[in-house]
Image: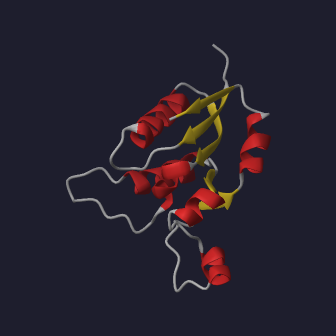
Amino acid sequence: MSSLTYCLIVTGPQYGTEQASSAYLFANALIEKGHHIAQIFFYRDGVANANKLTTPASDEFDLSSAWVSFAEKHNIPLQVCVAAALRRGVIDVQQAKEQGKETSNMASIFELSGLGTLAETLLTCSRVVQF
């Protein structure tokens, strides 16, 4: 079987739905099978996965931290829709300064980007899977 290039789109938050956890498990399975992930794009409520201040109970899986570890280990870009993020209070250091906010809450490995970035990446992918 030949290797495919995937783009994943995550539209669900880390808690309350299975979308983000299913995406995480799928991403791990892709890597195990030798496939490449060009980008993971967090859109709509999925932008909550980038919030570094999420603190689950000690007996719960920390999906936000898991995304960070996964991306660092496999060198996979984690893109966050800037418009969706700002509407939902997920903000990086630069946007916090520009918007006059006291602090940021987006984990540094995540990057704010627009739908144009997603569209460009989609042109290079063999498969696109949305969760």
Question: Which residue is drawn at the image coordinates 49% and 71% (left, top)?
Answer: 105
Q: Answer left or right for 124 relative to 130.
A: right
> Where on the picture, by quarter, is residue 12?
top left
Decide: is 32 above or below 85.
above
Q: Is residue 96 above or below residue 129?
A: below
Q: Residue at x 56, y 70 (%)?
A: 91
* x 55%, y 63%: residue: 87
- Left or right: 15, with 88 as reference point: left
Left or right, residue 58 beside residue 29: left
The residue drawn where x is 34% and y is 50% is 15
Split into 4 quadrants, where in the image is the N terminus?
top right
> Residue 7 appears at what percent x and percent y?
64, 36
Specify the color scheme: secondary structure
Query: Which residue ends up furthest to the top in the rendered image?
Result: 1
Quadrant hosting residue 126: top right
Q: Residue furthest front?
A: 87
Residue 73 screen position, x and y as percent:
54, 49
So how many labels did they put on this image? 0
**Percent x, y for residue 96?**
60, 79
Tell me residue 57's x, y (percent): 22, 59
In this rendered view, identify the residue nearer to me: 59 or 73.
59
